[in-house]
Amino acid sequence: MAIALQPIKPKKISDQVFEQIRELIFRGQLKAGQQVMPERELAEALDVSRTTVRNAINKLVVLGLLEHKQGQGTFVRFPDTRPGNPVAAAMEVEEATISDLLEVRMGLECNAAALAAQRASERDLQFMETSLEEIRIEVNSGRLGTEADTAFHMALAYATKNPVHVYLMKNFYDFLFVGIKKNLSHLYEAPENIDQILRQHSEIITAIKQKDPQKASMAMRRHIQFVQEFFRNRS
Amino acid sequence: MAIALQPIKPKKISDQVFEQIRELIFRGQLKAGQQVMPERELAEALDVSRTTVRNAINKLVVLGLLEHKQGQGTFVRFPDTRPGNPVAAAMEVEEATISDLLEVRMGLECNAAALAAQRASERDLQFMETSLEEIRIEVNSGRLGTEADTAFHMALAYATKNPVHVYLMKNFYDFLFVGIKKNLSHLYEAPENIDQILRQHSEIITAIKQKDPQKASMAMRRHIQFVQEFFRNRS
DNA sequence: TATTTAGCATTGGTAATACCAATAAATTTT
DNA sequence: AAAATTTATTGGTATTACCAATGCTAAATA
């Protein structure tokens, strides 16, 4: 007998719950930042076990749509902080130090400087010089030019014309710079350091202008080494 | 009183299990297609509840690293058949080429090799040599040792002892794999290249054994340059 | 009274156990 | 020998209990 029987839904219950909640989020009935019903209530409302609800919610958490907060509840994440960004959490968990961050930047950015020296357009150079100028202004106004500083390094990333490098820097921007930002205040407290740093940045730009990869890489190396030294001495 | 007590950070148990299993996959100790231990056995072996193991595994399933098959077991997915591989997708969107990937790896991995030369433990070296040996076996059997090759580079990442670098490479894993797979499949057209590659990997290990950062970095540089040259000549 | 402290309620995290459901292999039956 | 059945294994769901973190509230204290 070949009667086309209705192939019953072989779906896992937890997946059905998952779909329902996700729908609520997509439809905007669960807005960003809002708290979702507690697991216990959801379980009763849907007449399934808390275990099942839990699996569904966990899936949404892993996908970055929801966020667990023990003792408070589960909340809808804001879309702009969603894509692949367990960064902040990872930062806490991984015990990453400023030193660790600088080590990685040494490899990544020296290479980027060398690439930029081969490919940077006039526009790229202008962006970098603008950022450098903004740092000067900020610092002279008594503020710290952290924003401008990161802008400089992002401009460098774009100047490599390498989409993979840009992708990395975009996605790990927080991870690579957040630690620096927090501690940059100390570095900028000593005015004599500021001149050093400005000069180092300037040297990087000069080397890129001259289209000298070796020189650019070395300039970046000296810059990062300087920062490394600073943090080594104060800890 | 302002004694800076060390604020304990109790990671979730399920996340610890998650990390362990994921590391087994990255290191190649759990190969693609292979079945992982049943949840009940894992729970007993790790001395945690099955619930916890379940949560950890579920997370890996959602991330696409594992695959559930009711009545059979849980299996390691083949990296290139992962649905919605975020990095691979990004590679399409960003129009990234193998050449772009190799450029970034040049910066990241040369630096990693230098760090590993300063910090690699015996265990790290063993992992690298095991991976290298597995590549040999795979190649001699007519297959291409893409997974073993990836495991080698992950082992190098772990050997740096730098949590930021490890974190980057973990999230870079798919990208790395895709790149390596394409590398090898094309390099395989000229078998004499395989010997070159094996020797280059061997030189990297040797340099790390000798705790010579410069040499390790240079060995890695030569390796990547070799692959770059190959792709330059065939396009 | 103002502040601190302690306790309580809420909510996610883990555990233990039992049973359901699907699959594959072994066994029995035809 | 082939087919049907049973059995063992393994993931899926349910239930219950308790732990752990957070925030609120009321009691205790200065």
Image: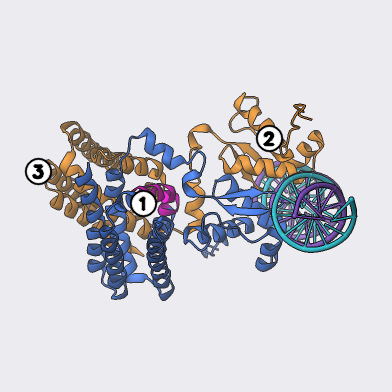
Chain colours: A orange, B blue, C cyan, D purple
Question: On the rendered structure, is C18 left or right of C11?
Answer: right
Q: Is residue A147 at least partly visible in the picture?
A: yes
Q: Is residue A144 at least partly visible in the picture?
A: no
Residue for badge 3: A210
Any mark on residue B180, and which? 1
Instruction: Return the x and y of residue A53 as percentages of the image width and height.
Output: 73, 41
Instruction: Return the x and y of residue A234 as percentages of the image width and height.
Output: 33, 63
Residue for badge 2: A36
- Tag 2: residue type? Val
Q: Please, which residue is most extreme toward the left here?
A: A210
Label 3 Cα crowd, 10 Å radius (few <14 / some 14-19 / many 20+) = few
- In reply to whether residue B193 is colored magenta, the answer given is no
Q: Is residue A170 above or below residue A193?
A: above
Label 1 Cα crowd, 10 Å radius (few <14 / some 14-19 / many 20+) = many
Q: Nearer the viewer, mark 2 or mark 3?
A: 3
Query: Mark 3 falls within which chain?
Result: A
